[in-house]
Structures are given as structure tokens and as C-alpha cells.
Image (cartoon, rainbow, N blue to C red):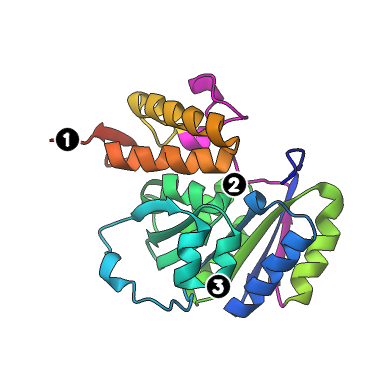
Amino acid sequence: MANEYTAERTVSAVFKEEQQINQAIRRLLDRGVDRDHISMMGRNFQSKTKITGFITKKDVILGGLRSGAIFGSLFGSILSLLTGVGVLFIPFLGTVVAAGPLSAILLGAASGAIAGSAGAGLVSVFASLGMSEDKAAVYQTRLEAGDFLVMAEVPADKTGEIQLLLESEGGEEISISDMTLPKPCPGMCNGVDDLSPEVRSHLSEDAQTTFIERYNAVYQEANNSLEAEQAAWETIHQQYTEDENGVWSKQKVTA
């Protein structure tokens, strides 16, 4: 992937069929959209493996985020092309599969921002990212009905091209916004002030330090902010529990 990829706008669309998003994402990659800037989520993936055995409603996030290769074997080859795939339990939606930057955001916000949003569910999350509330409500309704959401962060001069691509593959309710999904830090995290508000608001001071240390260690090795963010959130989930305000603040007691 080119390191100079510039994401300036987000083009979003919903699809009715899993086959449609498979083709749409392949074409996005063929057009040069960086896979680290493609997100998708949905409920009705046709898994070849019975997964109810390890999914329980008391687990908000199940095992953190995993590689696309692992989930590709469960839910289809398209997920093997994306990064940061996770299985999440989200209030009002149930169990969903999400991939890309959106999955990392949901990993930090699922039980806090979503569960604490007075019934707004994903609407509050999407609205906090800069999407209109009307469009966010439509997307949540479509996801509840079993449709799929694809979001592509693209350079400004590619917006029209990507919109036509998604439409040609059956995309509906197309939205173009100036938002891009927030990253935890601009490269390396030099301190708490570098943490994005979206991340910082879900972490206690101790948890912020833990997050930064793990993020930087992985970023130095992989030079990939999404991979580093996934690893940092996994560490937070391993070492902390959430308080009643949705903040990861209580250190787990280890034997």
C-alpha cells in the first residue's frame, strides 16, 4: 500500500446482498482505495461455521479484533481482503461482523457510546463522526433489517468516481461526507495530548497510558495505525473493565 494515500471524504452505501459487497469491495481495491480505509459491517453473513457457541450476549466484544484471514475462513473470502475484522454484540442490532477503521471505533465505543445513548444505538456513533442524523438513522434501520454497510475513505477528487462505482454494484442510500473515521494518533503517540478525543473519552488516565504504550510498540513494528489501534484495544480489554459510564477504568485482578 502506498503510504501517501490521502483520505479526505467518506462515501457510504448500503447493500442488500453479501455478494454485492464482495464485488464492490474488490472493485474499490482495484481502483486504488487503500484497504485500511475501507469499512463494512452487517449481521447476515453466511457463515460456514456454527458460531453461536462462542458468541454470548454478555460479551460486548468477543476476543477483540482479528485478522481478515481468520474471519475469511468463517464468513467468506471478502473479509480476508480487509483489516481489523471483529465480531461485536451491539445493542438494538445484536451480533454483527465489522471490518476496517469502523470496527476499531466500535471496539472502543460499543458498550459506552452505543449502550449509553438512550436508545439511539449506532445513530449517536455515526453522528459523532460527522454524519447527518437523518442518514445515520437510515443506516441503522437498514442494518437492523439485515442489510450491509460499506464506507470508503477516499481523496476528494475520487468522490464522484467511487459514488458511481458503489451505485453500479447496487449500493443504495449513498452518502458523501467530509468526515473521515478518526485515528487514535497522528502516527506515533507522543503523549496523551496526541490521543483523539474519541479514544481518550473512553479511557481512564491509567488506561490511556496502557493504550499508548501498546499502540506505539505495535506501530513501530508494523508502521500501520489500524493494526496498532487494534492491538491497543485488545490490551485494554484484557487488562481493564468498563465502569458505569462506559470508560475503561477498572484494572482486572490477575491471579
Amino acid carrying label 2: it is Leu
The disc, 1 or 3, on the residue closer to the chain's N-terminal end is: 3
Give the total of numbered labels. 3
Dot 2 lies on which element?
A: loop
The disc, 2 or 1, on the residue closer to the chain's N-terminal end is: 2
**Residue receiving disc 2:** 129
- Left or right: 1 as drawn, with respect to 79: right
- Left or right: 47 as drawn, with respect to 250: right
Dot 3 lies on which element?
A: helix
Q: Can you tell which quarter of the image residue 29 is in?
A: bottom right
**Residue receiving disc 3:** 142
Instruction: Judge whether residue 233 can be spotted in this image.
Output: yes
Q: Main secondary structure of the magenta part?
A: loop
Magenta residues (range): 170-199
The residue at 85%/60% (across/down) is 160
Q: Position of residue 201 (x, y in %)?
A: 44, 34
Q: Which mark is residue 254?
A: 1
Q: Position of residue 64 (x, y in %)?
A: 39, 50
Query: Can you say which quadrant of the picture contains the C terminus?
Result: top left
Q: Position of residue 5 (x, y in %)?
A: 76, 43
The residue at 85%/62% (across/down) is 161
Amino acid carrying label 1: it is Thr
